[in-house]
């Protein structure tokens, strides 16, 4: 359903503004652990580098940290801060964010895996923007494995972004679709893959929409 909605929004966006394409590489390291049975921590570092260094929107550094709370066996709650500046030229951005993450294992015959739904709310303080931007994000993700193979899986996810106020423009913001293998090595998972990122223009008449073809490598580390 989310995938179909994303296609409709992309079609609508391309009908009202031209679209430019770019090719970028994204890398990210995500780490998390537990301090007590209920309370834990989360931290991440990401870099996004464009093939064309003039594309400032796609040259970014992201540093996030959060406290997390285990509300139940399947539900976790997060609250944190992120520093996410644009690079070349520099444009500062600070974010406070909260999220709820629900995950559960599933099995359909020989096909087994884990699915999760993550809802994140962000309060963005963007340089040269007098208003605080409120943005909502919904991610649906599944990892699939065949039989009892715990080492190699296929990861697929779709994330939808919507800005709730006009800061600078409300409504649909962007959509990301990722697919790739996931290699599980003990407490570390490595996921290289392809991502398609459609970004709606913030100034429809003067700036085109963006279609970003991304080669991504993500590393996930779970500490006890």
Image (tube, grey):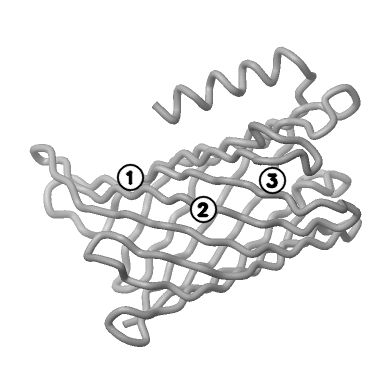
Q: Residue at x 8, y 38 (%)?
A: 109
Which residue is at the front of the view, 12 or 144? Answer: 12
- Hey, which quadrant is residue 62 in on the image? bottom right
Q: Is residue 180 above or below residue 12?
A: below
Which numbered marker is on residue 24? 3
Look at mark 1 in the image and give the residue it sits on: 142
Residue 43, x across and y down, in percent: 53, 73
Give the position of the C terminus as an image quadrant. Answer: bottom left
Q: In this view, does 38 lie above or below 191?
A: below
Which residue is at the front of the view, 159 or 22? Answer: 159
Which numbered marker is on residue 204? none
- Hey, which quadrant is residue 19 in on the image? top right
- Hey, which quadrant is residue 103 in on the image? bottom left
Which residue is at the front of the view, 196 or 208? Answer: 208
Residue 164, x across and y down, in percent: 65, 40
Tag in front: 2 or 3: 2
Residue 9, x across and y down, in percent: 59, 23
Q: Are marks 1 and 2 in contact (CB under 8 Å)?
A: no
> Mark 1 or 2 closer to N-term?
2
Look at mark 2 in the image and give the residue it sits on: 120
Residue 43 falls left or right of residue 13 = left
Q: Callout 2: 10 Å neighbours few (<14), some, many (20+)?
A: some
> Mark 3 or 1 closer to N-term?
3
Which residue is at the front of the view, 219 or 108? Answer: 108
Residue 140 falls left or right of residue 131 = left
Q: Callout 3: 10 Å neighbours few (<14), some, many (20+)?
A: some
> Mark 2 or 3 closer to N-term?
3
Residue 162, x across and y down, in percent: 61, 38
């Amino acid at each position: 359903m989310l995938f179909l909605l994303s296609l409709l929004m992309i079609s609508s966006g391309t009908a009202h503004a031209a679209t430019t394409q770019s090719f970028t590489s994204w890398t990210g390291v995500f780490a998390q652990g537990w301090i007590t049975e209920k309370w834990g921590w989360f931290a991440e570092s990401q870099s996004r580098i464009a093939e064309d260094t003039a594309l400032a929107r796609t040259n970014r550094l992201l540093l996030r940290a959060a406290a997390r709370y285990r509300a139940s066996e399947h539900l976790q709650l997060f609250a944190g801060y992120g520093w996410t500046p644009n690079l070349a030229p520099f444009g500062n951005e600070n974010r406070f964010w909260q999220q709820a993450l629900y995950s559960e294992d599933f099995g359909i015959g020989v096909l087994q895996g884990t699915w999760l739904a993550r809802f994140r709310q962000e309060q963005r303080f963007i340089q040269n923007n007098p208003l605080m931007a409120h943005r909502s994000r919904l991610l649906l993700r599944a990892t699939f494995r065949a039989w009892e193979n715990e080492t190699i899986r296929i990861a697929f996810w779709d994330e939808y972004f919507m800005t709730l106020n006009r800061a600078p423009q409300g409504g649909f913001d962007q959509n990301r679709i990722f697919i790739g293998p996931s290699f599980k090595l003990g407490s570390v998972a490595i996921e290289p893959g392809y991502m398609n990122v459609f970004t709606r223009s913030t100034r429809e008449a003067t700036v085109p929409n963006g279609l970003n073809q991304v080669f991504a490598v993500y590393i996930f580390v779970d500490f006890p």
